[in-house]
Amino acid sequence: MNGDLSFQYDPDAWTFIPRVWPNDEFGRSAARWAKAAARTIENRSPRTTREHRAWLRAALERFATMPNPGEAALYLFLRQVGGPFLTLQVLPIEASSDAQQAAADLLRLEDAAGLRQPDEVRPHTAKGLGVGSRGTFSTDDGEGGEQVAVVWVFQSGGTDVRISTVANYPQNLAVVEPEIDAFIDGITVIG
């Protein structure tokens, strides 16, 4: 890979989720980190119940211990407990010599139905990454409900960048989309 990624984002909306434990910066265990991160989110929430706290700590610990294909960075959007939430996965990849094919490959989504092309593709411009593509997928959540997956692909500074999210509650995506755009605007390739 030719460059590392730099992130500028609103810390009152986004939480970085470390994926390697023990972690020199974030502590010895995912459980201890999840408890501290949950407390930060709870402090900016007007009302937090015992059930909210238990759910949030369990969710953060689950996210922090998920398998991490390709060493992707994971960020949680949650301004306050009980509000809309989702995760963004950011994966930098060494740029391919065939930029057009690489972009098409990175826009694919693998789900229970196999490898799929997006239902819709449109251009997307980000301040730090330039012009890329945004692909939207409608998927079945396996329980008869609908999910929406979105994948953004950029090629910047010799690095391909793939950003993805799956919204279990599609209505949340429309609410959070301006926050996602601002987050993506704050990513740059350095080095």
Image (spheres, grey):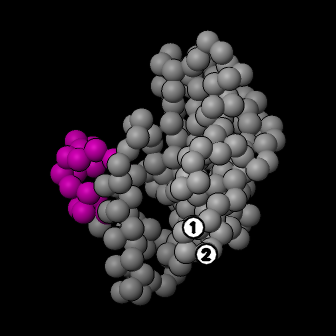
The range drawn in magenta is 18-34
Q: Is residue 62 above or below residue 182?
A: below
Q: Which of 22 and 44 is in front in this view?
A: 22
- When the figure is inspected, residue 69 is found, relative to residue 17, above or below; the finding is above
Tell me what residue is drawn at x 38 percent, y 44 percent.
68
Extreme residue toward the top, this view: 97
Q: Which amino acid does label 2 sit on?
A: Gly
Q: At which x and y percent is residue 33?
A: 28, 58
Viewer can see residue 147: yes
| Residue topped by disc 2 | 144
Q: Position of residue 56 (x, y in %)?
A: 40, 72
In the displayed structure image, the side of residue 15 where residue 164 appears, left or right: right
- Identify which residue is drawn at 55% across, 74% down: 143
Please provide percent x and percent y for residue 171: 70, 71
Q: Residue at x 72, y 28 (%)?
A: 130
Q: In this rendered view, identify the residue nearer to me: 176 or 92.
A: 92
Determine the main secondary structure of the stretch shown in magenta.
loop
Q: Are marks 1 and 2 in contact (CB under 8 Å)?
A: yes
- Helix, strand, or loop for circle 2? loop
Quadrant in the picture for residue 95? top right
Q: Of helix, strand and loop, which one carries label 1? A: loop
Image coordinates for residue 177, horizontal then vertical, percent: 71, 57
Residue depicted at 63% across the width and 25% down the height: 102
Q: Mark 1 points at which residue?
A: 141
Q: Which amino acid does label 1 sit on?
A: Asp
Judge from the rendering whether residue 100 lies leftward or rightward of residue 34; answer left or right: right
Q: Real-space Cα distance between discs 1 and 2? A: 6 Å
